[in-house]
């Protein structure tokens, strides 16, 4: 009996295994064997091998330039990728000195006066070096090549931070060049103990990860843990730190982020000086800081740049805004549905009067307006910058006013939702902001079904859950729970001169950062 084509499609959907005849896997053993070869004494054999590796001449931006070194009369070739190298540097500092040389006794190292000059012996080293923007010099009769630093990747200049904006403090932000980002960190930490290690973390794209730490501060076990987790990755490409974060975090399905993402070099430097580890990558205009705690996401880089009273005032405002964001709409739902006796009579009558013609219960009202607010926020982020503010104004004013006049929602619901949404903008960290916005919906639902008791139960379960989270072995609510020796920088910070200790939960080698007065 002939099967129906649609039935065949259903069977393939139920058994989504790749058909080896339809998706044949080609072996890369030959290419790997070629790359593992040593450099041949015959220059033409080396050139033929590299042409095969890079598929020349089809590969248009890979160049091989043949010439003769004057003075020593040796045939040579330069291999470089024109789109990621400084061609002017190649002409001025490599080609011209080699072509104009008149001394037969000079070696290549003495002819070329350039900063980065490394001998290599394997074809694989040549390929990796060229892929990093270096120029490779091959000489006939020599069983080694020379890797010369001429990288020139295009990118943005150093600009202001977009998300972590401060009024008082440095304005510099990371960009997509790892070398620039490392330079920005070294400009702030001028110490020989600042170590920058690089590890290749992908098989095909050869993406490099830079691990920064201060040798005489950072705990060795923490560094080893991070290196092991990064080295164990078996993946073809990781192009960005945001992707790497999802590979190495301990709880990928946790609603709370456990790795801090920052675009400010001053913030990364301050964490380094406390014994943390910072990760940098090319193509990523930010850094990952690990381990991290809940309080790090609540803090703002500006808190320590402001004076003691001003900095703590903004922190208290931020915590109060966090409370309103999470509990504001939920408290309104629980009070109007279950606990009306908690509201003064006059206010209760005012709320009842505004809801008299509204056909929906308070829970549906709040969910409708919260969803509308999230849609407006998302639309404002995704549209071009020129019309983003316009969408916010139209959404907030026209849609809200129209909904009230149409008796779909009551005016007080618009106020409650707008206040909660506005307070959510006080959290600058994107990941924690998403977590708080999702948690807000969970509290609204718990309040709608069980009132204050539902909110209390959910809050208790949430605290239990947060206590169970760890970031690279560090408890999430440290140093509040469990307690460690530290400057106790949680909600209220101390005077700068009284912050004597580094955070004990990262086990730094030197916990005292300031002498006692």
Image (cartoon, helix red, strand yellow):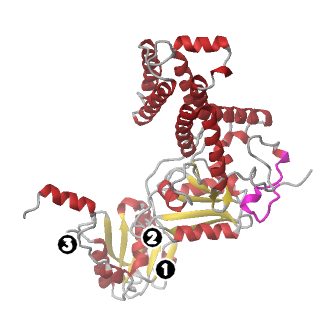
x and y percentages locating residue 160 in the rendered image: 56, 41
Tell whether 435 sits left or right of 463. Answer: left
Q: Is residue 493 left or right of residue 515?
A: left
Q: Earlier in the sequence, mark 1 or mark 3?
A: 3
Name the mark on residue 430: none
Q: CA distance from mark 1 to mark 3?
A: 45 Å
Q: Are marks 1 and 3 in contact (CB under 8 Å)?
A: no
Distance from disc 1 to disc 2, alpha carbons, whole Å, reads 29 Å
Q: Are marks 1 and 2 in contact (CB under 8 Å)?
A: no
Element under disc 2: loop
Labels 1 and 2: the sequence-earlier one: 1
- Residue at screen point 53% across, 71% down: 231
Identify the mark at residue 119; answer none if there is no mark.
1
The quarter of the picture where the N terminus appears is bottom left
| Along the line of sight, the residue nearer the viewer: 456 or 184 | 456
Residue 47 placed where, x, y %?
31, 79
> Is 322 in front, or is 143?
322
Residue situated in front as seen by the camera: 386 or 344: 344
At horizontal 25% and vertical 59% (from top left) the residue drawn is 13
Which portion, as a residue range, is magenta?
A: 497-513
Q: Quadrant of residue 41?
A: bottom left
Q: Can the viewer see residue 170 in this picture?
A: no
Looking at the magenta stretch, what is its main secondary structure?
loop
Dot 2 surroundings within 10 Å: few (below 14), some, or many (20 or more)? few
Residue at image position (74%, 52%) is 481
Query: Which residue corresponds to mark 2?
Result: 234
Which of the 4 image quadrants contains residue 425?
top right
Where is mark 3, residue-wise? 21
Q: Where is 493 relative to 383, above or below? A: below
Query: Residue 53: horizontal and vertical position, in percent?
Result: 31, 75
SS state under label 1: strand
């Amino acid at each position: 009996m002939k099967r129906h084509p649609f039935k065949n499609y259903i069977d393939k959907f139920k058994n989504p295994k790749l058909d080896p005849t339809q998706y044949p896997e080609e072996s890369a053993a030959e290419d790997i064997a070629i790359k593992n070869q040593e450099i041949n004494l015959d220059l033409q054999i080396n050139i033929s091998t590299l042409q095969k590796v890079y598929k020349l001449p089809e590969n248009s931006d890979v160049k091989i330039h043949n010439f003769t070194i004057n003075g020593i009369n040796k045939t040579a070739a330069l291999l470089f990728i024109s789109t990621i190298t400084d061609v002017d540097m190649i002409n001025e500092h490599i080609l011209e000195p080699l072509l104009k040389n008149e001394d037969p006794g000079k070696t290549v190292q003495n002819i070329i006066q350039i900063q980065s000059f490394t001998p290599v012996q394997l074809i694989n080293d040549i390929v990796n070096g060229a892929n990093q923007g270096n120029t490779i010099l091959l000489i006939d009769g020599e069983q080694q090549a020379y890797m010369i630093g001429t990288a020139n990747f295009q990118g943005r200049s150093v600009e202001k931070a977009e998300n972590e904006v401060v009024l008082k403090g440095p304005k510099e932000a990371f960009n997509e060049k790892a070398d620039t980002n490392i330079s920005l960190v070294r400009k702030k930490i001028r110490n020989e103990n600042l170590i920058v290690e690089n590890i290749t973390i992908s098989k095909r794209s050869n993406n490099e990860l830079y691990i920064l730490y201060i040798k005489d501060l950072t705990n060795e076990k923490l560094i080893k843990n991070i290196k092991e987790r990064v080295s164990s990755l078996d993946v073809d490409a990781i192009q960005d730190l945001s992707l790497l974060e999802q590979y190495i975090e301990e709880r990928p399905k946790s609603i709370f982020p456990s790795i801090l993402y920052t675009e400010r070099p001053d913030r990364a430097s301050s964490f380094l000086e406390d014994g943390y580890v910072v990760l940098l990558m090319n193509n990523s205009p930010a850094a990952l800081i690990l381990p991290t705690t809940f309080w790090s996401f609540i803090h703002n880089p500006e808190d320590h740049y402001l004076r003691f009273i001003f900095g703590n005032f903004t922190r208290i405002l931020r915590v109060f805004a966090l409370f309103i964001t999470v509990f504001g709409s939920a408290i309104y739902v629980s009070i109007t549905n279950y606990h009306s006796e908690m509201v003064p009579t006059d206010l209760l009558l005012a709320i009842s009067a505004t809801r008299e013609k509204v056909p929906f219960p308070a829970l549906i009202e709040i969910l409708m307006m919260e969803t509308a607010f999230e849609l407006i926020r998302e639309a404002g982020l995704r549209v071009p910058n020129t019309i983003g503010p316009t969408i916010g104004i139209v959404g907030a004013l026209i849609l809200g006013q129209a909904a009230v006049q149409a008796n779909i929602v009551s005016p007080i619901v618009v106020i409650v939702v707008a206040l909660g949404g506005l307070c959510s903008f006080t959290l600058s960290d994107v990941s924690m902001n998403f977590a708080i916005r999702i948690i807000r919906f969970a509290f609204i639902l718990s309040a709608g079904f069980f009132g204050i008791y539902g909110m209390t139960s959910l809050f208790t379960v949430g605290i239990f859950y947060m206590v169970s989270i760890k970031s690279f072995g560090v408890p999430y609510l440290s140093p509040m729970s469990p307690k460690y020796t530290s400057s106790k920088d949680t909600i209220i910070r101390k005077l700068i001169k009284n912050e004597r200790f580094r955070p004990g939960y990262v086990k730094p080698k030197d916990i005292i950062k300031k002498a006692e007065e």
